[in-house]
Image: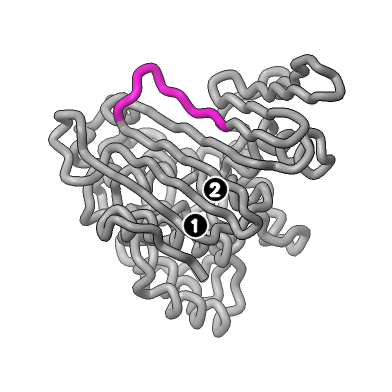
Amino acid sequence: MTILICGLGSIGRRHLRNLQALGRDDVVLLRTGKSTLPEDELEGLPVESELDQALVRWRPEAVIVSNPTALHLEVAIPSAEAGCHLLIEKPVSHTMEGIEDLRTALKRGGGRVLVGFQFRFHPGLRAVKRLLEEGTIGRVISAHAHWGEYLPDWHPWEDYRLSYSARSDLGGGVLHTLCHPFDYLYWLGWEVASVSAEIGTFVPLELEIEDTAEVLLRFKDGILASVHLDYNQRPASHWLEIVGTEGTIRWDNTDGMVHYWTALSDQWQETPPPNGFERNDMFLDEMRHFLNILDGKATPLCTLEDGIRVLEIVLAAHKSASIGCRVSLK
């Protein structure tokens, strides 16, 4: 079985390293040669420069779509037509154009899709999901997610202004790039009914896309949630707080800790991450899950339809900010 990786930026190389760590040596690379990262870790691996040729020559069982967001479907649709299973990095795309073509290609080819929202594999957020399912804080009333991180610090080896995160033509902008909170709120059990948003570019980073967003979500069961995203905050801060009728849950990505308070106990309790937990463990677990999908041992934890729903939320936020009013989702 061959796995084709399309896109060798930081996330594509992370997937390569994790596949190698899991004992997979059946990897082929599709690359344009535009990566700003060192070449040494790619030495000795088969390389293709044309997708069609790679699909015919190697007949991969799976394709990892890790090129810039705006180019995802250029890889995903032909790969799906060829019958490949797909791991598509988030977000699925930058617009809805071509999404129906991808659905059609998957039906014809028979492949499965895992969308790369790795925070579904974070032990802290899994603990939050368990606490909610157990009714630990009663009926949920509201939630707030916050993620701020200074863009120039993400990839110090490259000019951040040239990265996909900073370029609208490649599907960048803070709403698309930091869309994980929309996914994990959805995964925690809440279906979005409407979106209100304000966005802006506030810091002189020479960006043509939004660097800050404030988004208000109303869920179909009446719960309200707010999501703050920015490319500016130092030090980085990423956390989630959920308020219920009987308590509060807090998760902080900095240390991976979950703290929760209940009216019954009248004290804060905590759930730490596993000993030695590192950020890459999420990606490793995600890759193990993808390999299990290929072996028929699992179904995707984050499906294509899940990924499309998150894209719809992001696009609704953009529309709301543009027209100045709330946008309803079907």
Q: Are marks 1 and 2 in contact (CB under 8 Å)?
A: yes
Give x and y (percent) for residue 56: 44, 74
- Mark 1 vs mark 2, foreground winner is 1
Q: Residue at x 34, y 41 (%)?
A: 213
Q: Amino acid at mark 2?
A: Phe
- Report the side of 303 relative to 64 (left or right): right
Marks 1 and 2 sit apart, C-alpha to C-alpha, by 10 Å
Q: Residue at x 33, y 42 (%)?
A: 174
Q: Is residue 287 magenta?
A: no
Q: Which region shows up in magenta?
A: 232-240
**Residue 117 badge:** 2
- Report the side of 214 relative to 220 (left or right): left
Give x and y (percent) for residue 121: 65, 41
Q: Visible in this render: residue 53?
A: no
Rendered image quadrant of residue 61: bottom right
Q: Earlier in the sequence, mark 1 or mark 2?
A: 2
Q: Amino acid at mark 1?
A: Val
Q: Nearer the viewer, residue 198 or 3?
A: 198
Q: Visible in this render: residue 195?
A: yes
Q: Nearer the viewer, residue 11 or 308?
A: 308
Q: Residue at x 69, y 28 (%)?
A: 248
Rendered image quadrant of residue 11: top left
- Mark 1 highlights which residue? 310
Give x and y (percent) for residue 263: 80, 24
- Disc 1 element: helix
> In the displayed structure, would residue 101 be above or below residue 231?
below
> In the displayed structure, would residue 236 be above or below residue 284?
above
- Report the side of 84 relative to 157 (left or right): right
- Report the side of 259 relative to 19 (left or right): right
